């Protein structure tokens, strides 16, 4: 029987990173990565296939990194785990393992909408052939409806819009696109950008039914509206792939993911899980977190991979750091928004600073930039931040993430040591996050009295 | 006699920020800013006057922010401080103060080079008229020599090169440009960029003499070489302006700045100092630091301004975070380089990760990016980082700065929670700083045995 010290199931962000991390930490162990897909897509790059990149083939994770790290690859379906004998049954035979990492990911959520099985209804599935079929179908389509105005929905809409001559509409059940991750003022700015680029928005309404005769013809909304549709793409979230783990008797968590402790160990100490398939806890309070992001997956994979033969790392819980972009505008978030924090019961002080990301503001590349920080009033601890601006917003949020992870206070951030440069950043006098911290301190004092 | 609760002397980054901070923290106090200059230049923007911006007038800090913050302005020369009576004598009369902040900045260092007083020899002084004169002179110049290959020198060279049809040479005494702030491999990359843009480099040589008959004609080097010169610009560093403080009997520090404690208080408890005129200590070990940067100045100003009527903040010492850019390449540094750390006596482990700042690497805006992290071997604590890449390097360094300031270890950084996006950042699997931390951990383990 085939044998490997470590068997990793899944080859996307989590599985790949777990295998590489295992190699780094356990240079003498044999590592086998088992996955179904011949080719692995870069998950976050999927929306960009349709416009910017032009083809699923341009959005692949190559296998060179496996070879470079001396990781064996078996392309096969993982059928069943015999935990007692530590054997994985696959469509290409059995594999004996000493430690296993399950990184089976997630699949697009399918809403309970009549008509979602009509021809012309797609998801943004991590599957090269399905995406190629969608791309083909889109070429001939005129009316495209995107269900879901989260980051996948808005990125898909903007990218499909680049194909040209289409009538694109996003349908979002919440009052605003991105409303689960950004405070309203940021959502509104992004909606303006989408509209200015020709994307139609139907918010605060639900898809009641997808209608058509074998093939999708229109989308019927809960507010009575109807939208013509040649293609419908569902982007309403993801569901953990836990069939294999569940069948093997591993415990599941509150949100339906594979239950893991802070070391990413499952209810079987020989088996770890990470990525979209694993249950997550929040950095804030430790309750269950519904977030599914590639960056969370790779963090968990670095913990699981390091812990295989000796517990070395613990997960402090998911901060939730991510960004999105449409045209020249990027939006980024880390931790809790003002709305989320208030809803959870924090007494918050928020402060927003707007200004250019260059100094003077006429330097090339200057973009209107806005940073909002949210602090807990009593301790002054940073709970989260949101950034709107040019491409560097995607890295500004990582500085804010570092502040959140270190539970820095407004006072700490007011004394943050920034690097600034006329051609690269805001001025040191007006650096957004530092001034937002100062504003928040002032507000805490004014109310504290 | 004119009276103000707070008198700030100096209107550049430090003085301005100190006054604004004083206003935030002490809303009921009267604040007077005294400065000599009619118009205040953005200090870091000075090199960009010559190419990108086109005029000193396009690189000004406006006075609107003073009015907005209810800060009075007196344009006058500060002549003398009567500390016993708490009176500042100025060219426009006396001012009684309760607390004073000295932010008199620095002036360009003048080397002991024969001929530096010839017509045609300039510095990058923070003076609108002097810079306008230099700009005028440059228009007619063919051969331009920049003395000093630090960030001011290379930015000046590249910007002056944009005027067109010039022969520009940087003379640097050290083996490489930027050698005081970057490890050699980064310096070499920047030198290649400068050369590819037509800037001549003469490194590891010293200016022996500037020759000419009343007017500069050539620069004579210690290696025997000579360079024709119509204009020479000196960019070899800055000297603290401490005349006023010294005359008032305030204690000076080891590097010649005004001595201050961690609260930015001088030897007179009513007088604080901040910015280039104030003595600095290093975040690493607490010894004297020679760094003079606008971002350090504003940090110190936020401490001084908050502490005026009650000590609220302490300076943890200068990390040293800054960036520079030539063309599309940005370089950024925080904390100690490998060379600096080794020289100071640290046993270091360094790791460098290179790869694109987008994923997949064919996304628009992708730039080759390199991140080097330097850790103390025994504790694993991050001592510093350097970044080379696109414009966002200027913000990546701020994430690294946060890690340094929080004395995060390689293990902490391996579990850093990043936000990533195809159009904005590297992939979560290959995120530079996280992978550099993983590499360093591996190296520590290999040698630690």
Image: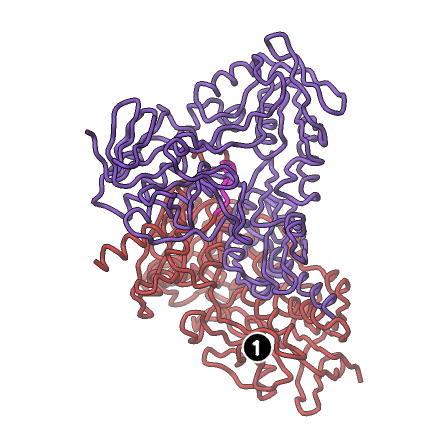
Chain colours: A purple, B red
Residue at left offset 42%, top offset 48%: A261
Along the line of sight, the residue nearer the viewer: A220 or A369: A220
Along the line of sight, the residue nearer the viewer: A64 or B33: A64
Q: Does residue B419 belong to the magenta stretch?
A: yes
Q: Is residue B325 above or below residue B123?
A: above
B312 displayed left or right of A395: right
B3 displayed left or right of A73: right
Location of the N terminus of chain B by quadrant is: bottom right
Q: Position of residue A279 (x, y in %)?
A: 47, 42
Q: Which residues are magenta?
A: B418-426
Location of the C terminus of chain B by quadrant is: bottom left
Q: Position of residue A46 (x, y in %)?
A: 49, 28
**Label 1 secondary element:** loop
Q: Position of residue A311 (x, y in %)?
A: 33, 52
**View extreme (right): residue:** B1
Q: Position of residue B13 (x, y in %)?
A: 62, 65
Q: Tell me, yes or no, if residue B427 can be seen here.
A: no
Give the letter of the chain under mark 1: B
Q: In the figure, residue B346 lies in which quadrant?
A: bottom left
Residue at left offset 62%, top offset 21%: A113
Magenta stretch: dominant secondary structure: loop
**View extreme (top): residue:** A213
Crowding at dot 1, Cα within 10 Å, few <14 / some 14-19 / many 20+, comes out as many
Residue at left offset 27%, top offset 39%: A6
Q: Is residue B78 above or below residue A398?
A: below
Q: Is residue B59 above or below residue A70?
A: below
**Badge 1 is on which residue?**
B264
Q: Tell me, yes or no, if residue A20 can be seen here.
A: yes
Q: In the figure, residue A17 lies in which quadrant?
A: top left
Q: Does residue A40 belong to the magenta stretch?
A: no
């Amino acid at each position: 029987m085939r044998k490997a010290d470590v068997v990793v199931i899944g080859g996307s962000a989590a599985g790949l990173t777990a295998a590489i991390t295992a190699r780094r930490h356990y240079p003498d162990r044999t590592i086998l990565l088992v996955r179904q897909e011949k080719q692995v897509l870069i998950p976050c790059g999927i929306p960009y296939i349709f416009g910017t990149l032009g083809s699923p083939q341009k959005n692949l994770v190559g296998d060179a990194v496996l070879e470079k790290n001396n990781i064996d690859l078996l392309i096969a379906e993982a059928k069943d785990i015999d935990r007692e004998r530590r054997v994985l049954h696959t469509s290409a035979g059995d594999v004996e393992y000493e430690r296993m990492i399950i990184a089976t990911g997630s699949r697009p959520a399918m809403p309970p909408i009549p008509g979602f099985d009509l021809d012309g209804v797609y998801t943004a599935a991590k599957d090269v052939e399905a995406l190629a079929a969608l791309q083909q179908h889109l070429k001939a389509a005129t009316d495209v409806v995107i269900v879901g105005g989260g980051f996948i929905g808005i990125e898909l809409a903007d990218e499909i819009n680049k194909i040209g001559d289409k009538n694109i509409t996003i349908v979002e059940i919440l009052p605003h696109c991105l409303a689960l991750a950004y405070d309203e003022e940021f959502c509104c700015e992004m909606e303006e950008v989408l509209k200015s680029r020709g994307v139609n928005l139907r918010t605060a309404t639900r898809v009641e039914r997808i209608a058509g005769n074998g093939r999708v013809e229109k989308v019927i909304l809960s507010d009575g509206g109807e939208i013509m549709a040649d293609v419908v793409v569902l982007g309403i979230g993801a569901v953990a792939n836990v069939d294999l783990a569940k069948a093997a008797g591993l415990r599941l968590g509150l949100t339906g993911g594979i239950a893991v402790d802070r070391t990413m160990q499952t209810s079987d100490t020989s088996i770890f899980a990470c990525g979209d398939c694993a249950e997550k806890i929040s950095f804030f309070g430790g309750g269950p977190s519904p977030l599914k992001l590639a960056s969370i997956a790779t963090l968990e994979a670095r913990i699981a991979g390091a812990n295989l033969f000796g517990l070395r790392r613990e997960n402090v819980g998911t901060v939730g750091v991510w960004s999105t972009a449409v045209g020249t505008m990027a939006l980024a978030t880390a931790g809790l928004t003002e709305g989320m924090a208030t809803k959870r019961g924090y007494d918050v002080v928020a402060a927003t600073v707007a200004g250019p990301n260059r100094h003077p503001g006429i330097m090339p590349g200057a973009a209107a930039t806005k940073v909002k920080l949210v602090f807990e009033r009593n301790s002054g601890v940073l709970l989260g931040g949101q950034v709107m601006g040019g491409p560097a917003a995607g890295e500004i949020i990582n500085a804010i993430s570092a502040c959140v992870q270190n539970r820095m206070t407004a006072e700490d951030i007011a004394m943050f040591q920034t690097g600034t440069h006329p051609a690269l950043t805001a001025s040191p006098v007006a650096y957004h996050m530092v001034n937002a911290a100062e504003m928040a301190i002032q507000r805490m004092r004014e109310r504290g009295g």
